[in-house]
Image (cartoon, rainbow, N blue to C red):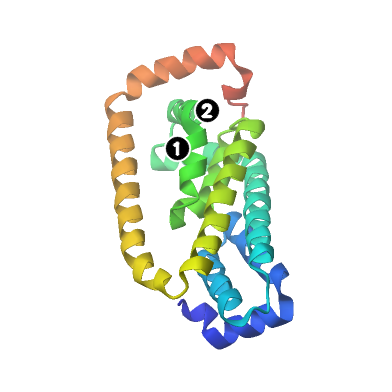
Amino acid sequence: MHSFFSAEHLSSLLLQYGYGAIGVVVMLESMGLPLPAETLLIGSALFCATTHKLSIAGVMIAGVTGAIMGDNFGYLIGRRLGLKLLQKHGPKIGLTSERLLLGRYVFFQYGGPVVFLGRFVAVLRMFVALLAGANHMPWHTFLWYNALGGVCWAGGYTLCTYLLGNEIFKLSGPLAIVAGCCAVIVIGTSFLFLKKNEKRLTEEALKAAEQNEHLRIPSA
């Protein structure tokens, strides 16, 4: 288990702060902070299974609530500050106004599955809400996929760990490798597709922006 949450530290944390600690850590990671929320959920579920000093239902509710709230805060931060930062510093790394518009268009079209699947990949989990906000993904769409992802990730991980007990550690390594490989393949394939079709997609984005104000990029 991550050294940040040794067995003694975790037990002390949960006994002292209970469900609140779980919700806060998961929420902060979902907002973009590098915290081991997944490790905490697994450890908390094992703590429930072995000590019965916390309710597994309470852990699940705390995890799901923290995940959904954190992503919504991250979305708001990204929507308020993300676009301005991208407009200001994007050209320095090749992110022209056309590519910024293209990114908004792609996220607008396919952002839902990205938000949902991003829940299960550690790096994406920290930044997907910020990206959704920066790209002005419609909030009602974001909320739906965010909530669905939060329930499946936090609730699913917690319940499976509780039912499987220590067997989860034998499975977590291979599952993490498989998830990481899938993420690399999906991201790599998406990058190659965008690179090959950038001109065509940019033209589509320009036409879509003329008809949909959500895609238009305000002046910096």
CA gap between label 2 and label 1 equals 22 Å
Image quadrant of residue 94? top left
Q: Is residue 28 visible?
A: yes
Q: From the viewer's perspective, tell me whether residue 197 is left or right of residue 140.
A: left
- Residue 162 appears at what percent x and percent y? 53, 68
Q: Is residue 220 visible?
A: no
Please determine whether, in this image, residue 216 is positioned above or below residue 14.
above
Relative vertical location of residue 202 with respect to residue 103 in this rendering, above or below: above
Q: Of residues 20 and 110, which is closer to you in this image?
A: 20
Q: Where's residue 144, x and y in %? A: 62, 37
Q: Secondary structure at mark 2?
A: helix
Query: Residue 108 — which label?
Result: 2
Q: What numbered label is drawn on residue 91?
A: 1
Q: Image quadrant for the N terminus?
A: bottom left
User: Residue drawn 53% across and 40% down?
Assistant: 86
Viewer-nearest of discs 2 and 1:
2
